[in-house]
Amino acid sequence: MGPLAAISIAIVLLAGARADEPLHKQIDRQIAAGLKDYNKVASPMASDAEFLRRVSLDLTGRIPPASEVRTFLADTSTDKRIQLIDKLLASPEYARRMEEYFDVVLMDRRRDAKVPGTEWQTFLRTAFAANKPYDELVREILSSDGADPKTRPAAKFFLDRDLEPTIVTRDISRLFLGQNLQCAQCHDHPIVDDYKQSHFYGIQAFINRTFLFPTVQDAKAVIAEKAEGEVSFISVFDPKKVSMTTAPAVPGRKPIGDPKFDKGKEYAVAPAKNVKPVPAYSRLAKLAAAITAAENVAFRRAAANRLWAMMMGRGLVHPLDFDHSANPPSHPELMTLLADEFAKHKYDVKWLLREIALSKTYQRSSEVTPRTQDVAEDRYAVAILKPLSPEQLGYSMTQATGLTDVYRADLAKNLTEPALQAKLAPHLGPFVRFYGTRPGEPEGDFVSTLDQTLFVKHGDQLRTLITPRPGGLVDRAGKLTEPSSVVEELFLTVYGRLPADEERREIGEVLRTTANRKAALNDIVWAMLASAEFRFNH
Amino acid sequence: MERCEYACGTNDHRIDRRLFLGSAAAGLAGFAGFNARASELAAAQKRMLVIFLSGGVSQLETWDPKPNTDTGGPFRAIPTSVPGVHISELLPLAAKRMHRLTLVRGINTAEDEHGRGATIMLTGRRTEPGIQYPQVGAVAAKLLTTSTQELPGHVQITPGGGSGFNKDDAAFLGPKFASVTLADGKPPADLLRPAVLTSDADREREALRQKLNAKFAQSRKSAQTEAYTESFEQAAKVVAKANAFDASREDPKAADRYGRHDFGRHMLLARRLLEQGVSFVKVSHTNYDTHHENFDFHIEQLGEFDRPFSMLLDDLADRGMLESTLVVVMSEFGRTPKINDRYGRDHWSKAWSVAMAGCGLKAGAVVGKTNANGTAVTEREVNGGHLFHTYFKALGLDPTKNFHPAGRPIPIADPKASAIAEILA
Amino acid sequence: MPTLNIDPTKTRVLMEFKHGRPLIGCRFDPAGRYLFAASEDDTIQRFDLLTGEKTSFVGPKSWTRGLAFVAQNPAVVPLAAIPASAIAGATTLVRKPAPFTLLSGDYHGKLHWWNGTDDAPKPTNSINAHDGWVRAVAVSPDGTTVATCGNDNLVKLWSALDGRPIRTFEGHLSHVYNVAFHPNGQRLVSADLKGTVKDWDIATGKLVRDLDAKVFHKYDTGFGADIGGVRGIAFNASGTQLACIGITNVSNAFAGVGNPLTVLFDWADGKPKLLKPKDAFQGTGWGVHIHANGFVVGAGGGGQGRIWFWNPADGANTHTVTVPTNARDMAVHPDGTALAIAGSNGTAYLYTMTPAPPAGTPPKKA
């Protein structure tokens, strides 16, 4: 290679292009560039135990069993973290976790009405297991009319919202564009200049001709569509009350005009009593492509931001549904990078999650130090604490108390993820009831309510989970004689780490001096499960 | 400025960017304004009691009788302690206390369906897609409960069903102000320490929990972890006050006076809770949806209602609490003047009544009139929005102010309505 | 009394008496000349079966259901004697009937005396009988005593002549819905909301026994209220049977979802026999009668009305007539050939249980 070529290569390397630099390295570079003296200020890398617990919760929705903790801590290979990430991504638990996460995101825990939850969940889980491209998944959700049993589960998004136009419009814009246009229904958004009333109705125009057939109440209803109908809107702030309309449009993009039809030819199947009409041209059919189009930058931004937030505890755009020019991302270049790379990689979810997990930013410790105390959360100098979701909490409780291991042993040769899940699922009810948001309500800020606390303090379910059963935690720990080993077993199982010396000493002392070791074990396990260290993903 | 104890970048300790993105909107009074208000109120703590007669009580058999008309039915109208004001003979004890009551007789809520009617009466708004408004109890709990109050601020006592905590009725005000349901007056099961958990074990494991949290907090702390650990402290306080929910601890003579039936017990429990400083209590009495044999059933139900209602008014007055307690007796709607062929009355929202008493009201006043046979409002027609304004004005608050959920300004009461000034003191 | 020619399966409307407001109760006077029907307009209407005339009895300030009579040896006017002209609606001059007293109880608790044959009737005496509704009125076989019952859970006896109180029977724990004298004049039965039927010795005032009609009562836990009561009550002429009618199987008290039921007690041993409508019908039984021919007839309604005929021997519902309105009371004509229905639509229907004449005149409205 000549000197000129070498210099140009060097220039290219020094320039920002870094075309073939892995994404996770670009992430770290961008994050570091976002804070003065980032590398001096930022917390160190998370310990192995910290990392194992965090990535298990993020990618499989559960804490790791004590055996896995021991194995991982003892593993001396230098690439064990990469291997762990890949192992978790390849596991059936990953698909289950993504199904649980996106079920809540897309359906807000609405009660099943027209599509059984199990069918919808299977649809999601299968998609994530096969690593279906995210844009393809969204297109399926936005294009199924529910008529074909094979694709009906995907239509749950529309059907179980009763196709209510205000709610569907709001949720399409909120979930797939990262823009909550609800306040733009009656007027241009009062606070956000970018959100116009025409944006709200542009989305609604895709669905304004649709209706549920035969009736809204029918559990087997499908989506039907008329050949006519326009949205019309008046701004409540407009003194002249001028009535406006729009063709279907994605915010910021050109409206999609309806083709003209000769009179009498507007329908392929004309409307009649008890007959589902089929228009010659369907506005609804344009929705999926319009939302996921390459030109619709909002879609890939919202998607990448969502996956980032799932892992990192906070979106680059925050809140997730308020992407607009006056609310820039914490790291604008990184946001664009993530979005564009996600699209370039054909919306490969596993690929994006892997890159995020590989980053130092993700693997940073959550330990606050005097250096990081005053640093804003959105600088990612310290890993952000994330409360466990109801699903993560419930299944982590069953794992921590040993019930999951008991079921694994019960199933023995027949142990598969679905079989184990079938045994665990009945235990989830109270966790969803107490820790989940109300049906139909998007997840809001973290709250710790009286009923949740009483559930932990006095409730039956927790007590029953902790109660010694053969193979369970209290039983296993009870069989160990040396208090230090007991404490180690407890900490590895519940917290996923080794106890500190002080902890070994103090809790060991409790065990040594108690009259009733079994009772003491129950109390210790309860205290650990009730503690903030368990409640949060750190 | 005080040194922030934890990562200042967390949600609760940075003013939400959204609120600043439109300075005009941020200029409106937000939560900060209300915290100041609440501390003013702490000096004169107010509270509210709603008695919800489920199913739609007949205004013709209660507050606005029309005897000897084609709609009046067989009951008399009896004179009350306010000259010129008559109510149904089915409320003899309440009639003697009319000088404490305020009647609104010109209500037209134009909604004959139970659920939507209840929404109008409890939120002051009609049902709208895409937004849920908080119920009056959540609003009252938010605006009236002081930070030193340990008991939940929003309690409802239902005849049956399950005890527990509701997330729904506080809407965007958050689960802290959602109601605690005491079904048949019983507290949620988990409120009381279960027998199998001894107080020693409770104490020991609590101590260990706190120790573990303290250690964790040395290195990892956020507004969320603080909220989480603090909720145990708060729960312990409520548990310590669990007796507040036990009406059997009241003087047995009081139980006799209120009547030893379910509603009597529930009203006595309501008194107890109000005395303990609970900001809002709703007691439901079931049921009044008398499509069939309206008259017999109203004898029975009002027979249960009249006594404890009157005793509670007396007790609030005797304890000097009536002037700081707003009492409202409501249903989701009234009943048809037309009597159907099975001696029933059906749903009716065009011309009906609500009775109130206490804080901020003109005692003994009547506002609103209906025509001779109760089929239309003839004077001062009001709806659920007007009533909602009136409640909070009576409590000394400004219902035209806004809440700001997610930065969006939402007035406490429907801006299309206003308070019924004629009955405000 | 001979009751020839009765064939329940031939039951048909003979006359209709229209009033502008819903009817609550109905009775024939002992001679069977008049049909009295109490209405939601606080009046009692008297329909003259021979002339078709309608007279308003005005005075009570509330509703009436209980109607009873005192008459000296009334000569029963057989319906067969009703001239075709009356049925056709023309007014015929007929002899004035022998005087009789009407007793009515209203929902303000008052008991009123009337001269039943007056042209412009007003109460001749009124007393405060009960605190709350008077739900039923009965007159002793010898005409000397009036029994009333009501919402104060009490049963009371009064002198039929002057209203002097004779006795109060205490013991019911809920509203007393109905009261009836045993034909032998020595016993009185009263029936309450909760389904207790009390059998009293009139002379001593003592309770002889309770009969169990709890099948009529339900505490509807969904609505938190009691529904029940014996809505219609009747002894047979010899006093060997007592019929009670009401509603049972209530699954929704506030929508009236339940079924009519007649309970026929054997007076001697108090054993009940249940007489049910053959076809499913949602509603309440309001009136019942044990016919001299041995069958039991009951009437009631919900959205529509029904008349049921039962054979007490096997409990079979042998015939059912559809009434176009809720039948809120039923009375049987003293000549045994006809029965009257008080309709919630404001019309009193006179049904004959005799076959139509070959070239029959259509029923005429009065």
Image (cartoon, coloured by chain):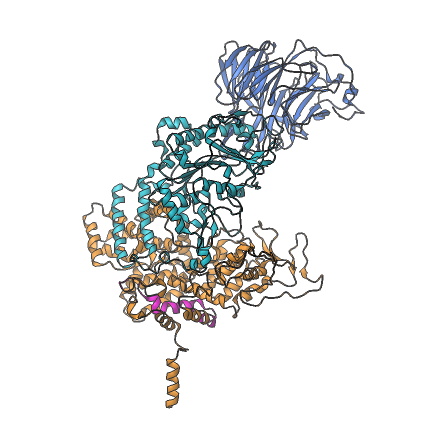
Chain colours: A orange, B cyan, C blue
Q: Quadrant of residue A276?
A: bottom right
* Residue positioned 60% across, 35% down in the render: B378
* Residue positioned 57% across, 52% down in the render: A220
Highlighted range, magenta? A341-370
Compared with C360, A237 (above or below) is below
Q: Is B99 left or right of C330, judged from the image as shown?
A: left
In reply to whether residue A340 is colored magenta, the answer given is no
In reply to whether residue A351 is colored magenta, the answer given is yes
Q: Observer-nearest residue: A156 or B131?
A: B131
Q: Is A199 left or right of C49, judged from the image as shown?
A: left
Where residue C338 sits in the image (x, y, percent)?
Answer: 70, 21
Compared with B339, B167 (above or below) is below
- Of the 4 image quadrants, the one containing the N terminus of chain C is top right
> Can residue B53 be seen at all in this image of the molecule?
no
Q: Observer-nearest residue: A247 or C269?
A: A247
Taken as a whole, is the magenta stretch helix, strand or loop? helix
Where residue C68 sits in the image (x, y, percent)?
Answer: 62, 16
> Can residue C107 be seen at all in this image of the molecule?
yes
Q: Quadrant of residue A369?
A: bottom left
Where residue A434 sits in the image (x, y, percent)?
Answer: 40, 49
- Of the 4 image quadrants, the one containing the C terminus of chain C is top right
Of all residues, the one furthest to the bottom in this rendering is A2
Where residue A439 sits in the image (x, y, percent)?
Answer: 47, 51
Of all residues, the one furthest to the right in this rendering is C359
Q: Observer-nearest residue: A325 or A282?
A: A325
Q: How many marks?
A: 0
Q: Observer-nearest residue: B274 or A64?
A: B274
Q: Is B311 left or right of C7, judged from the image as shown?
A: left
